[in-house]
Amino acid sequence: MKIFNTAAFLLSATEGAWVQPKYEEVLKASKGRSSFNWGFPVGPRNSKAFETCGEPSLPKNALKFECNSSTCAVICQPGLMPLGKARVRCRKSGWAKAFPDCGGCDPEPKRAADVLAECKDGKTRSCNLRCAAGKFFPDLGINQLGVGLKTKINCKCKKRSGKCDYKFVSKELKRKNVSKFECADIPVTPGTTQPTAPPQPQSSAAPAVIIEDNQASFSGSCSSLIPGNTEAAAICNTIEDVNVKRALHHAPPLEVDAKLCADAQSYANLLAQRDTGLSHDGALLQSLKQGENLMFGVNDMSVEGNFLLATQMWHDEWKDWDFQKLTCTPGRQCLHFTQQVWIGTQKVCYAAAKTGRKTYVVARYSPPGNSMRRMRENVLPAN
């Protein structure tokens, strides 16, 4: 199997001593985002073209090699990093040294039971930590809305020992131990009530990795309105949960709708079949006159667990929504929240489709929300 991923760039003449580019430039080259010579020049210090030394063995947990001029670099699997100097030169005597293995932290950081983690893989693995509802990190405090602040951790590895551990990104917390970072109860102001914890997914055998996209009263028993739907119980339990959240924002309860269920399931199946991430079909939604929220989770949760997790994440966006200015904190996402609590929306349904450990969740709403002209009257602050 050919594991070289060669960069066929011409070596340009440079003045003065050669300066080694950062490893990030190698990663950009491996993704086709960079087109300059990052490898050590052929000739100086007995360096030879990388092809001369032959194809080395792929190190543990490595994805491939990226090669240029006299140098090859180890490209690790997502979330992992080289446990040593990633770039090795080809010389007259062969490769200058062995290529390092790749390593990283455990997928799920060790932490206190009431600390929630939302993790993703990039150059390394990183996680956002926050406390369960009604709790906060004493080291961070709470915001003006009475909600505990969150913080970020990154996986760091010592190249000599190969030991990896999660570390806080914040300089103020760099000496803190992630596993011992605990939450405390938010103090209750006299005359108010303590917020209750959101319902937790009922089945979570593996840690969840969550990736989000960038965007009436009941007429009968919920399940009787969607006969034959195999996820009727999960859908109806989720709608109960959503209606509790809507009531906080003075929005009437939603009712399930069989047409929305069918449309949501069709689109969930399409997303799972493509398996290329999340995207809205604006033309389709406009023709159906429906609103939409999307999420996918990489986990072993039940369908209902993913539904509940999605609705909680969408609701949590209220922390970044300015109810006076009708704007979201720059760089954050709020339109899932505004659609979920939109007063004018009357009907909803949820659908899910799996591919491997991925579960794509689609929520469809009617009438749709998120009209900026009507935002103030349809999205109200909590009691």
Image (cartoon, grey):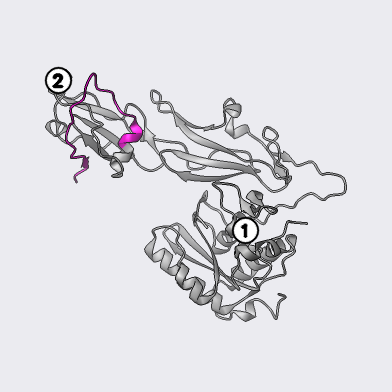
Left or right: where 307 falls relative to 248: left
- CB under 8 Å between discs 2 and 1: no
Which residue lies at the image location 72% right of the left edge and 60% below the top edge? 380
Judging depth in this view, the residue of 95 and 18 nearest the camera is: 18
**Number of callouts in the render?**
2
Which residue bears the numbered disc 1?
Answer: 337
Residue 92 sits in quarter: top left
- Residue 4 located within the stretch drawn in magenta: yes
Q: Position of residue 168 (x, y in %)?
A: 55, 32
Q: Secondary structure at mark 2?
A: helix
Amino acid type at circle 2 is Asn
Mark 2 or 1, closer to the camera? 1
Q: Earlier in the sequence, mark 2 or mark 1?
A: 2
57 lies left or right of 202: left
Q: Position of residue 279 (x, y in %)?
A: 45, 61
Residue 42 in magenta? no
Identify the secondary structure beneath mark 1.
helix
The quadrant holding residue 76 is top left
- The residues colored magenta run 1-26
Residue nearest the observer in this picture, 288 or 357:
288
Given residues 283 and 72, the one toward you in this image is: 283
In the rendered image, the vertical position of residue 78 relative to residue 196, given as above or below: above
Quarter of the image that includes the C terminus: bottom right
Q: Residue at x 49, y 76 (%)?
A: 287
Which residue type carries mark 1?
Answer: Phe
- Residue 46: give its label: 2
Q: Residues within 10 Å of mark 1 (few under 14, many from 20)?
A: many
**Measured from the top left, where is residue 369 in percent x and y?**
60, 67
Is residue 354 visible to us here? yes
